[in-house]
Amino acid sequence: MHISMYRNTIFSLIIYCLIAPSSAFSETQKAPNFSLPGQNKTINLSQYKGKVVYLDFWASWCGPCKRSFPWMNKLQKQYGRDGFKVVAINLDTSRKDAEEFLTKIPANFDIAFDKKGTTAKTYNIKAMPSSFLIDKKGRLVHKSIGYRNAEKKIIEQKIQQLTSRTIVAKH
């Protein structure tokens, strides 16, 4: 009986991850701040004020996370000069597992470690990877559950819109 319950729960989670749509947020919903240890420094969301942030939650055991890292490296390289920053929060209980992952799949963006899952709870993370796009004013503007090729283009378009510089016409 117990095995059957676990199978159903796992199956439901997998189906949810495959079909769960991304969602937009209200114009006023602020991204919750956090302060977590990073690879070389403490990472605070507030330090990215005025930047567009792609906030990603990941774990070393997550297959789609392995596929998303090269894409996030590309995003950071392509849009970094335009006020864009990728911040990835690792949720492994062992930092050693995360470091081994990063040795195999390096990140050219900021990594934070949340082994207790406090920030994941604040952001109501249900599956991995889960990511959020945060505008320059610190508002949540997009959420993605899972990593799907079809959604990459949508996210990149949103990043382009959010990082574009407004040209003021002279009268």
Image (cartoon, helix red, strand yellow):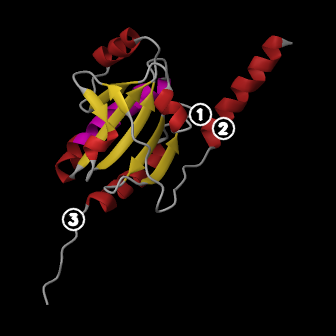
Of the residues shown, which amino acid type is indicated by label 3?
A: Arg
Amino acid bearing label 1: Lys
Residue annotated with mark 2: 16
17 relative position to 93: left or right? right
113 above or below 137? above
Q: Residue at x 67, y 31 (%)?
A: 13
Residue in view at x 39 percent, y 41 percent: 33
| Residue 65 part of the magenta-drawn span | yes
Q: Residue at x 47, y 48 (%)?
A: 151
Residue tagged 3: 165
First of labels 2, 1 by sequence position: 2
Q: Residues within 10 Å of mark 1 (few under 14, many from 20)?
A: some
Q: Position of residue 81 (x, y in %)?
A: 16, 49
Mark 3 and mark 1: Cα distance apart in space: 34 Å
Asked if residue 108 is positioned above or below residue 136 in the image, the reply reads: above
- Image coordinates for residue 21, horizontal then vertical, percent: 59, 49
Point out the image quarter for the N terminus: top right
Q: Quadrant of the C terminus?
A: bottom left
Q: Nearer the viewer, residue 136 or 109?
A: 136
Which residue position holds label 1? 126
Image-based side of 69 in relation to 80, left or right:
right
User: Is the residue 114 above or below the residue 145 in the image?
Assistant: above
Task: Kindly state the secondary structure of the residue where label 2 is placed.
Answer: helix
Q: Amino acid at mark 2?
A: Tyr
**Residue 125 point in image, percent of width and height:** 55, 35
Q: Which residues are magenta?
A: 63-76
Disc on the earlier residue, 3 or 2:
2
Question: In whole angstroms, how far apart are the C-alphas of marks 3 and 2?
Answer: 37 Å
Q: Position of residue 78 (x, y in %)?
A: 22, 46
Left or right, 37 with reference to 153: left
Identify the element where label 3 is drawn: loop
Q: In which quarter of the view is residue 145 placed?
A: top right
